[in-house]
Image (cartoon, rainbow, N blue to C red):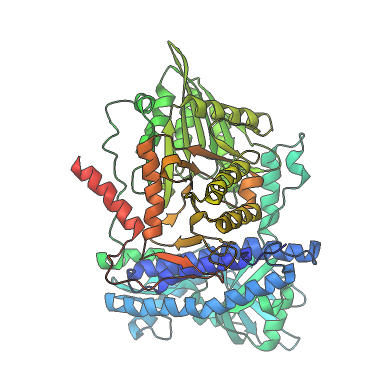
Amino acid sequence: MPQPYYENREISWIRFNTRVLEEAEDPAVPLLEQLSFSAIYQSNLDEFVMVRIGTMLDRMQEMPNKKDSRSGMTPKEQLNAMLDEIAALQPRKDAAYFRTMQQLREHGIAHVTFADATAEERAFLELYFKREIKPLLSPIIIDKRQPFPFLRNKEIYIVVHLQSKSGVKLGVLPSSGFHDRVIRLNKEGRFILLEDLLLHFAPAAFKNYKVLDAAAMRIIRNADIRFGNSAADAETDFRDVMEGLLKKRKKREVVRLQMNSSLNPDAMEYLLDRLHLKKKFLFFEETPLDLSFVYKLGDFNSNPALRFAPHKPQNRVDISTRQDMMSQIAQRDILLSYPYESITPFLRLLHEATLDPDVVSIKITLYRLASNSRVIESLCQAAENGKEVLVMVELRARFDEENNIHWAERLLDAGCTVIYGPHNMKVHSKLLLISRRTEDGVQNFVQIGTGNYNEKTSRLYTDLSLMTANPAIAEDARHVFDALSTDSLVSETAALLVAPLCLRSKLMDMLDVEIEHAKKGEPAYFAAKVNSISDRGIMDKLAEASQAGVKIELVVRGICCLKPKVEGYTDNIRIVSIVGRYLEHSRIYIAGTPERQKVYISSADLMTRNTMHRVEVAAPILDEALKAQAVEMVQLCLRDNVKARTGQPDGTFRLPLRDITQPPVNAQETLYERACAAAQEA
């Protein structure tokens, strides 16, 4: 039953993306970084439309009357609310882009169209089109007699309305895949986009017709794919199943049409009909339909004021480069904090394990990887060196499926044992187990992370990586890999929390302990830093704890279906959300006051999909200094008065008016400064 403190998941996500858009609007953010946030906003929205709107359309067909458990809305009501919210944000996105581009003109960077190009530039563009573009064009005519061409997801096309006596006739020009999209007009930064040029020269591509009007368009397809029973079919290689599903995804129905201008009403109606699309899925936009090109504009001007000051992940001075990593981990636990600290010690650990003759096995779970993955190289080398290498590759990592299929094949070719985990749930844990033979028996080394084994994102996402030789943690890690290898689940652990059977319940137990302390009039506390929260059971338990008097503080970057400060329900819950230079990605759970505090880092958000439908792992921080470090990270986020938005009882988040008598606190900048200071002091 919906509670007053519940928020609809889809609306909460859109509000998160609004916080991304706020960064594009923030005058304190450097201009090229503002453009990057505009592009991130659009990229986020593309994925949301592909997945969530696609899912909602499927639900409208399959279960039209089933109401959302958090808001009581039917699929149709949710869909309409989502489309309304997206439409309401569009003018802000357009305004942010043009405001930034106008200011960039002062630095020589200017997005121009053919109409406002200089005479010299027009002459260049006419010759450029004739020599470089026209020979590669493949114009397509669409009318009653011709089948509608297949349009690729997220790519831009030029559609033209052609004069015809026999009804509506359209022409289509692809503008992707054959030429650079950004065409520079001078050595400074004036440029035109390929679609702008094609719009101007469209009549030349359809010279036997009179072009009545033309527009750029871009489609988004439904990307929601179902695994079904085929995933469990023992007769079918799961890679083949996934490859078949990915082919289906590319051809799923259109769920959004973006256009930069309208065509004649008859032509528009004809286009929508051929795309099987209703008008509410049509959006007219003033900005370029795909903003990914803005990342190239950094090459146009080297002025450092246009970008964030460069940050380089720092090398930990307390980690010796002369002593091997396993020896150092055997002496003490190590906690790395990305992107403030370098991922190199972890990569060293894995590489040294591949070469150490006493290491007998390496087991790891992989979800997303860098394009040139050093992790894959080490695993392949280890297998070629004769070690037992077990790799759990998650083929269902959304939009990384093809990459992971490729990595699975590469690992198999190298002699690794590759598994795909339980047939009915994803494996989202970040877990590594290295077993080494010693004179005293087998010694194990474990790494548990909050983020992927991805060298690229380790410089962009805030994550934590724990490396330990703790025997209890190692034994639990062994049980996790045994379960993954046998298509079963871990039901009992000593140290780790492992979803889906023994993570959520133990978090609930921790909250119950705090509730009991609060009922006795004793101080009680719970905090968490996560990407998202939507698990109704956990939200209900947090509300119960709040009503009992437990002080609760949450740092939630994205989806937040829990409303704080709802009178009589969540009065004692404070929630902040940080959207800044880095993507907040680490998950930390804190239960209890300092003298009895338990601290865990985890791969799991507090969402039903993570707590009940995925294999996730949370690891305790046992070293007191490392525990204090993790707690301070959360407290610093809660003290942030620059990028932290405060959750409101209505489900919105607001940047509070900062007290100018208080110094500014930017959690991300502070953590980087601390990492630099530690390196400099050494």
Left or right, residue 378 beside residue 236: left
Q: Is residue 185 left or right of residue 237?
A: left
- The vertical placement of 349 against 168, above or below, is above
* Residue 559 visible in rendering: yes
Q: Is residue 176 visible?
A: no
Residue at image location 65% in from the left, 84% down from the top: 162
- Rendered view: 486 above or below 303: above
Q: What percent of the width, then of the height, locates residue 80?
A: 68, 74
Residue 417 position, x and y percent, is 59, 28
The residue under the point 49% across, 50% down is 524
**Left or right: residue 462 compared with residue 205:** left
Number of numbered discs on residues: 0
Viewer-proximal residue among 602 and 168: 602
Compared to residue 591, the image places residue 354 above or below, namely above
| Rendered view: 217 above or below 252 | below
The quarter of the rendered structure image containing the C terminus is top left
Single out the residue that lies furthest toward the left.
Answer: 681
Which of 224 and 258 lies nearest the eye of the viewer? 224
Instruction: Name the residue furthest top.
Output: 439
Comparing 410 with 647, the one in front is: 647
Q: Nearer the viewer, residue 167 or 469?
A: 469
User: Dividing the picture into quarters, in which one does residue 267 lie?
Assistant: bottom right
Image position, residue 148 (x, y; %): 71, 70
Residue occupying the point 55% across, 43% down: 367
The quadrant where residue 563 appears: bottom right
The N terminus - image quarter: bottom right
Residue 192 position, x and y percent, is 41, 75
